[in-house]
Amino acid sequence: MPEATGSTVFREGDDDRLYRRLRALTAEDLSSDLVRRVAAGDLELVESLPFAARAGVAALVRTEALAGGALERMVGPALDFVPVAYLDRARLAANAVARVVTAQRQAVGTGTLVSTRLLLTNHHVTPNAAAAAQQVVQFDYELGMDGVPVTPSEFHLDPTTFFWTSHEDELDATVVAVGPQLSGGRPLAAFGRSSLTAAQDKHAEGDFVTIVQHPDGDFKQVALRENRVVGRGKGGVTLHYQGDTLRGSSGSPVFNDQFDLVALHHAGGPRNETSLDNGQPVPDESNEGIRVSSLAMALREVLDRLPPEQRAVLAEALDPPRAGPDRESAPATAPIGRSLTIGSAETELQIPVRITAGDAFAPPTAVSALTTPDRPSLVGPVPLGVMEKNRPPDDDYRSRRGYRPDFLGSAVPLPTLSAELVGQAAVPAEGRAPDDLALRYVHFSVIQNGERRMPFCTAVNIDGKRLRGINRRTGEVEAAEKWYLDPRISPDQQLSQKVFEAQRPRIFDRGHLVRRLDPAWGSAVSALRGASDTFHFTNCAPQVSAFNQRTALWAGIENYVLTNARAGRKRVSVFTGPVFRADDPHYRGVTVPRAFWKIVMRVEQSALRATAFLASQETFLPDALEDFDDVGRVAIFQTRITDVTAHTGLDFGALADADSHGGLESAAPSEITAFDQVEW
């Protein structure tokens, strides 16, 4: 074969990196001189290598360079073979990945163990020691081979032992100690760890990557194959790769085919760096991760400045096994507790960090290892890691079935509107009868109040056994999430982006009434369409940021019911809507609801059960919004279905007979602060 330069044969344009990567893939079979010949384009040398090495090299080769049967000569008729040991390595790597949640078990992201004591996640998942002190990590939060959830093992995070962070505009990384065990049968040492090294031979353009994650805070899942490195950021800090991720995937580990940890996932699409090191723009259809080599170099600089106790904790993470995840697994022993302390209870260590991996990187930042004698009080849950972008909805609305009244086996029809409310409703322009007011989407429906430009009611069916991670490309941060008008009703009868853009200060979020996760079930196509449909403005109401992002109980009710033994992750239907009052305050031509209601329905022991809730954002909404001050408290009540009717004018019919709060004659609404206070 005639010689060719690496730039014409291989995707990777950095000759030194290409050599290092080829050397790592073939070192046991080729000498250094032969590796250089392969890098120069002599692919015939690869044909006699073991299959795993051939497949690894083939992944780096440009497609056009494999014309004329070269691919089959190198790896056979297909490129998607991997050794069976790949599955073993994947299982070991996945063991060390955990779901990061608040004290109320609201998912905020993903993390992975990088030592026997330290967890790595994103700064925007765990931004400071106070947040870490109120977070819990759940290992084994996954489905077993029988499709039944495995019992997770839960641990406190322990920033008093170790805490380091770098802002999301820089490395977007947090390393924090894992503390006492809360529940579960497996000790922390049983989960292993992943390597955290600055080695420069772990990836090259074209390499496949695997992302182990908790998308949308759901059970642990793996995005594998068809995920490839597309380049490195010009500043030397980021890695860009194709792959499917969602909110909640923030902080996930990104592995190469040998399950070396190559990046910390933090965003969809270009964020911290928009240009590749070859000068080309970062492709929009890619994810962005922070290169582990950059993290390792930053932490090595930190290590030299730490007190001895902290240095011992961090050193283990920076001196790991070289290849793949740690294969050691400890026997089941007593739960892990705190074993190290740092300094005095009043100490806060400020450590300047400067990264030298590229001229374009940001100036030094300060990171802190903070110790406090007691855990601080909860200041409110942090939302799911949000560096992802939604897909547009399907523009063919004819096939959408919407909410199914018979979904639970017991008929639960949509609520009916009084004659006065019917006069305010938006009528879909679909040729249906005027009294058929429901806008049908995938797995949910909306009855729209055209005058208030928001729903009277949303109704969603959730199949807990068929909920799934969603195959969708990702993009920018949450502020860039795109919402869509429904073409079946007038634009004047629904909210628009003008209500929410350029807020100074930012007061309102675009609050989902049907959560994006709830209709994401069924086939991969249906799940994607259902999640995308939740981004219609007909499913939106202005919600104060603190209400939308900090309300763990309100946001977690559906999850609690689905994972609770009473429902067994089976089927749930949910009605949700705003409470409209004549004295609601005005903002940019919109009358803002002070409260929201929700009714959760399921079947228990062959009987229909319904539980109603009311959540108020009134303390955030003075009559004059120019006096807005985000210091209020979200109050959540269990209420009666008849009370929801009194607040809204919606008639729920016989559903009131299934009310778990006592039906028609029960006492007044009761405030709740935890799920176990609810009369389910």
Image (tube, rainbow, N blue to C red):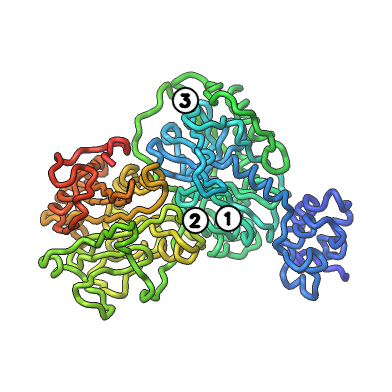
Task: Tell me where residue 650 sits by quadrant.
Answer: bottom left
Q: Classify 10 Å Cα crowding around label 3: few (below 14), some (14-19), many (20 and above).
A: many
Q: Are marks 2 and 3 in contact (CB under 8 Å)?
A: no
Indicate the amino acid at tag 3.
Thr
**Residue drawn 54% across the image and 26% down it:** 336
Q: Nearer the viewer, mark 1 or mark 3?
A: 1
Q: Which residue is mark 3?
A: 371
Residue 627: in sight, yes or no?
no
Question: Quick one: quadrant of the C terminus?
Answer: top left
**Residue 422 position in % (x across, y down):** 15, 68
Q: Are marks 1 and 2 in contact (CB under 8 Å)?
A: yes
Left or right: 385, with 578 as reference point:
right
Indicate the amino acid at tag 1.
Ala
Q: Earlier in the sequence, mark 2 or mark 3?
A: 3
**Residue 95 position in % (x across, y down):** 60, 41
Q: Earlier in the sequence, mark 1 or mark 2?
A: 1
Q: Earlier in the sequence, mark 1 or mark 3?
A: 1
